[in-house]
Image: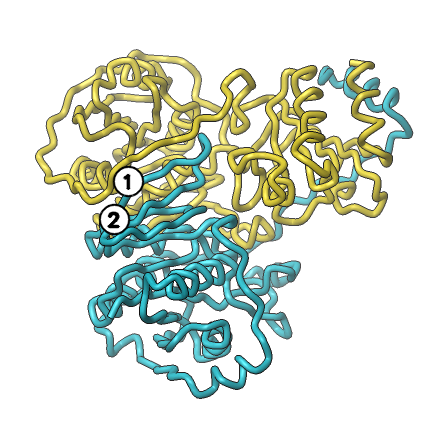
Chain colours: A yellow, B cyan
């Protein structure tokens, strides 16, 4: 393994926090020379931020008016061209990376290892399967170019360092016009980001309504926490989809996770098992969430949550 | 013929608590209930709704897998698919090989839309749809929670980390489904009988000329480390005191 190319996720001129975690993953491969690819319209600020991550040797900046908002069909052919000479092409296991990286792998004719949680050697990776009910150790052929996504909850961000040189790169490849961005509904931005927050308060089906879900937000604000939700709460319309925590939502690793009115289906637990401390509040003493909680409290959330808020 | 091709993977049922075999060679499958991947059932439901709205003429369900996957294809036919194809493969295929097999079928069947699950709940790879779109050189719209077909384009709302993103893609295209796209219908008993008469073709993977040699080797499976059960506190005061002691409040 000589050279690793990390794909930078960014939006509105800001580098996504997942990138420093991908760099940390790459840095755990002995002898890796880590380059970061920034595909943007201007990208100066994003490239500078990427260059300031410890372990990054070089930032490749590819400017194109078609690069934002990011569309996998537009980015993939550029990355496939850029990837020549790299043994490993890494992206985050965010919706951005999950959408993009397999398309890059498809163009490269390369196999992909999804959701890397640990690197055992340049050719051996560990990844969760069956909603985290099993961990597979996967061996890739030596000398074969591979694509991988990084389970960001498994890695601490690489520290600040550098700065590494930023090199503008021109890529001459036809870009498709058959995929067009229309709109994005951006969530409220005044709360910590769920994926990277140190504290998360989540609500489940037991909240009963979108209005009642405000209880969760109140407690989260008091704790300086991000808000999350179980699949049941999202399906019922109590919370928006981007708050879903679990196998098919966000996998998170906060210092504190507070599960309120969440029974703890295995698909939910797989999203929180790296949390340092788990607190569960549920009226059902038999709820599976209590099997993994560091602190469990059985009772009515509608009286307990305001009480806790008052005591904080 | 405006055709929709839907992928169906046979997986361990959603409700089964998966356990690793003691020797680490895989997970326990003996006597375990198998079902269609839930995301694939959502894909099929969406295809059926498009056909019912007059946006498609035929729904073709395809599986690349073991002979036993006929059962999941029969279920798909009972749900309402018009016909089915099983591409028989002995071993578990990796996503690139499945994408190549799907591409071979796409070239035969010329679908207007290919709808696949966003991931299979066994290997959790989330690769096949995007790889197929790359090989086919067509647009992809992954993690769809809303799909509208308008003439030669589709408008797709996608569940992304930031919220909901809407994109427009020219057809043909590959769509992968997220949980909230729809709620699949239940299979009715008379439809199971009717499904027995619908065509289910079998093709050998080798006959498609697809290179299916595995590239990744799974050396072992392990059970994940278990979290220790903690303590039960008796009231809000005790909980807050415990959190304060850990510096968490």
Q: Residue at x 79, y 34 (%)?
A: A281
Residue found at x 39% / y 64%: B7
Residue B96 rendering spot, x and y as whole percentages: 31, 58
Which residue is labeled 1 in the image? A72
Q: Chain of mark 2?
A: B
Residue that lies at the very extreme toward the left in this rendered image = A172
Q: Residue at x 39, y 61 (%)?
A: B53
Q: What secondary structure is found at the residue carrying circle 2? A: loop
Percent across and percent down for residue A99 are 35, 43
Quadrant for the C terminus of chain B, please.
Answer: top right
Tell whether B123 sits left or right of A146: right
Find residue A208 and report its image quarter.
top right
Residue A26 lies left or right of residue A229; in this view the side is: left
Residue B139's spot in the image, x, y percent? 25, 48
Structural distance between the alpha carbons of marks 1 and 2: 9 Å
Q: Residues within 10 Å of mark 2 (few under 14, many from 20)?
A: many
Indicate which disc residue B139 carries. 2
Q: Position of residue B118 (x, y in %)?
A: 43, 52
Question: Is residue A94 visible to us here?
Answer: no
Callout in the foreground (1, 2):
2
> Where B38 falls versus B226 (above or below)?
below
Q: Is residue A119 left or right of residue A292?
A: left
Q: Quadrant of the N terminus of chain B?
A: bottom left
In the rendered image, which quarter is residue B246 located in? top right
All told, the count of numbered labels is 2
Q: What element does badge 1 sit on?
A: helix
């Amino acid at each position: 393994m000589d050279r690793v190319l990390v794909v930078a996720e960014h939006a509105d001129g800001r580098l996504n926090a997942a990138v420093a975690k991908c760099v940390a993953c790459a840095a755990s491969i002995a002898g890796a020379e880590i380059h970061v690819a920034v595909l943007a319209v201007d990208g100066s600020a994003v490239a500078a931020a990427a260059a300031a991550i410890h372990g990054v040797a070089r930032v490749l900046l590819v400017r194109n008016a078609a690069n934002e908002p990011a569309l996998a069909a537009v980015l993939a052919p550029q990355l496939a061209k850029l990837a020549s000479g790299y043994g490993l092409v890494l992206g985050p296991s965010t919706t951005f990376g999950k959408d993009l990286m397999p398309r890059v792998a498809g163009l490269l004719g390369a196999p992909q290892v999804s959701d890397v949680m640990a690197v055992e050697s340049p050719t051996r990776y560990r990844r969760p399967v069956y909603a985290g009910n099993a961990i597979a150790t996967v061996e890739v052929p030596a000398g074969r170019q591979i694509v991988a996504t990084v389970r960001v909850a498994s890695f601490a961000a690489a520290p600040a360092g550098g700065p590494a040189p930023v090199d503008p790169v021109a890529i001459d490849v036809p870009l498709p016009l058959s995929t067009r961005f229309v709109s994005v509904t951006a969530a409220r931005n005044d709360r910590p980001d769920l994926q990277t927050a140190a504290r998360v308060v989540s609500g489940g089906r037991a909240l009963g309504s979108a209005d009642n879900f405000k209880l969760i937000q109140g407690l989260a604000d008091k704790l300086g926490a991000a808000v999350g939700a179980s699949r049941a709460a999202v399906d019922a319309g109590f919370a928006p989809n981007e708050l879903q925590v679990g196998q098919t939502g966000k996998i998170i690793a906060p210092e504190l996770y507070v599960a309120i009115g969440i029974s703890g289906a295995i698909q939910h637990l797989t999203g929180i098992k790296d949390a340092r401390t788990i607190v569960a509040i549920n009226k059902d003493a038999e709820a599976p969430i209590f099997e993994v909680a560091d602190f469990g409290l059985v009772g009515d959330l509608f009286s307990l949550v305001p009480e806790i808020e008052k005591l904080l | 013929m405006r055709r929709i091709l839907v992928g169906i993977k046979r997986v361990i049922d959603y409700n089964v608590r998966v356990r690793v075999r003691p020797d680490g060679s895989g997970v326990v499958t003996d006597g375990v209930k198998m079902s269609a991947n839930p995301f694939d059932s959502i894909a099929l439901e969406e295809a059926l709704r498009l056909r019912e709205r007059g946006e498609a003429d035929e729904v073709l369900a395809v599986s690349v897998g073991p002979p036993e996957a006929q059962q999941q294809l029969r279920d798909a036919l009972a749900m309402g698919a018009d016909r089915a194809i099983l591409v028989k493969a002995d071993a578990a295929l990796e996503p690139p090989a499945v994408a190549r097999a799907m591409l071979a079928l796409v070239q035969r069947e010329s679908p207007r839309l290919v709808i696949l699950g966003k991931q299979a709940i066994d290997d959790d790879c989330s690769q096949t749809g995007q790889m197929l779109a790359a090989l086919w050189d067509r647009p992809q719209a992954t993690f769809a929670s809303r799909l509208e077909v308008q003439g030669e384009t589709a408008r797709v709302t996608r569940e992304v980390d930031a919220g909901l993103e809407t994109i427009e893609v020219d057809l043909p295209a590959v769509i992968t489904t997220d949980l909230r796209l729809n709620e699949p219908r239940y299979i009715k008993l008379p439809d199971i009988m009717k499904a027995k008469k619908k065509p289910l073709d079998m093709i050998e993977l080798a006959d498609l000329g697809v290179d299916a040699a595995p590239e990744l080797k799974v050396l072992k499976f392990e059970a994940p480390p278990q979290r220790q059960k903690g303590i039960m506190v008796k009231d809000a005061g005790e909980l807050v005191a415990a959190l304060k002691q850990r510096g968490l409040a």
